[in-house]
Image (spheres, rainbow, N blue to C red):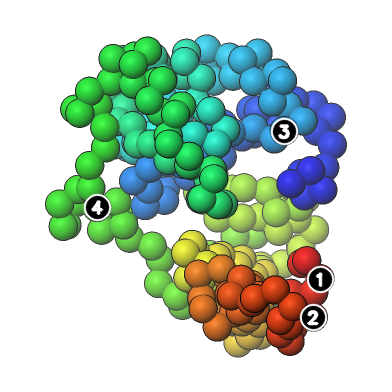
Amino acid sequence: MPDDVGTIADPQRFMDTLVDRALGIFANEPIDIYVNSTYIPDQLNAQYDALWTPARMKKIVDGLAAQGIAMEINNRRRIPSAAFIRLAKEAGVKFACGTNNAGADDLGRNEYCAEVIRQHDLRAEHFWTPPADGAKAVQRRPLPPLTGRTRLRRARPDDRPAAAAADGGLDIAGAGELRTLRRFTHEAMATVFEVLAAHADARYAEQAAHAAFDLADRLERELSRFLPNSDVGRINRLAAGEATQVSPSTMDAS
């Protein structure tokens, strides 16, 4: 995704931000397995070992261990590194073998995981198993309801735009008056979408959030390879020489 990431001018600052955000997710989201673990954008991948310093690795591993989150051994990217695996094993972090799930060829025969198992003497007790009912992450730390949640805070003149507040709310810089930040969540594409809407009118904020969620639902219906009636699903079933009508969004994505 080079176009989405853009040029990373300061790799060190990027890594510090990446680690801080990961720790925030570990602490606040219902997660069982840290997938695509330790991935960094392709433009930085040649510096993987240098950028994942011992201090940064320790923060990630300690965060996983504290929350009981497993670490995926990713076959496609061949990550985490041996140093990461060794540190995680010593900390008691559990492992899982997997991949990005972008295609059947990504998993292959799980060769990298097999290498890691042999190299680090991983045994059955080192691997994650699904928790019992009632102990799953989403049950221990459930997602917020689909209705908006409001936080109120007065902006300060020296705040940066949408700067994170100490209490977990957001400050809207330059407001000068009390603003309302409303949070909406929606499940689609096997994940959870979140919209933060800053507007005094609760109904307007909700309409804006639902417009975004409707778009996500439409794109899933058109582009999902898991839905047989989606544009992509129909394309995949076409025989040579056959044609089907697709939406403009599918054409744009092709």
Q: Considering depth in this image, is 145 or 80 the residue closer to the camera? A: 80
Comes first in the chain, label 3 or label 2? 3
- According to the image, label 4 marks what residue? 136
Q: Quadrant of residue 56?
A: top right
Q: Is residue 170 depicted above or below 18 in this figure?
A: below
- State the image coordinates of residue 71 (x, y, percent, origin top left): 39, 33
Alpha carbon of mark 3 to alpha carbon of mark 2: how far? 30 Å
Residue 82 or residue 112, whichever sits in front: 112
Dots 3 and 2: beta carbons under 8 Å?
Answer: no
Task: Nearest to the eye among marks 2 and 4: give it.
Answer: 2
Instruction: Name the residue rendered at 44%, 29% in the picture.
Output: 111
Q: Is residue 173 left or right of residue 110?
A: right
Rendered position, 98 above or below 217: above
The answer to which of 31 and 150 lies nearer the viewer is 31
Which circle's residue, 3 or 4, is located before the other in the chain? 3
Query: Which residue in the structure is indicated by mark 3?
Result: 42
Q: Position of residue 89 (x, y in %)?
A: 32, 19
Q: Residue at x 33, y 32 (%)?
A: 95
Asked which secondary structure carries label 4, the reply is loop
Residue beneath disc 2: 248
Residue type at mark 1 is Asp
Q: Of callouts 1 and 4, which one flags the residue occurring earlier in the amino acid sequence? A: 4
| Labelled disc at residue 252 | 1
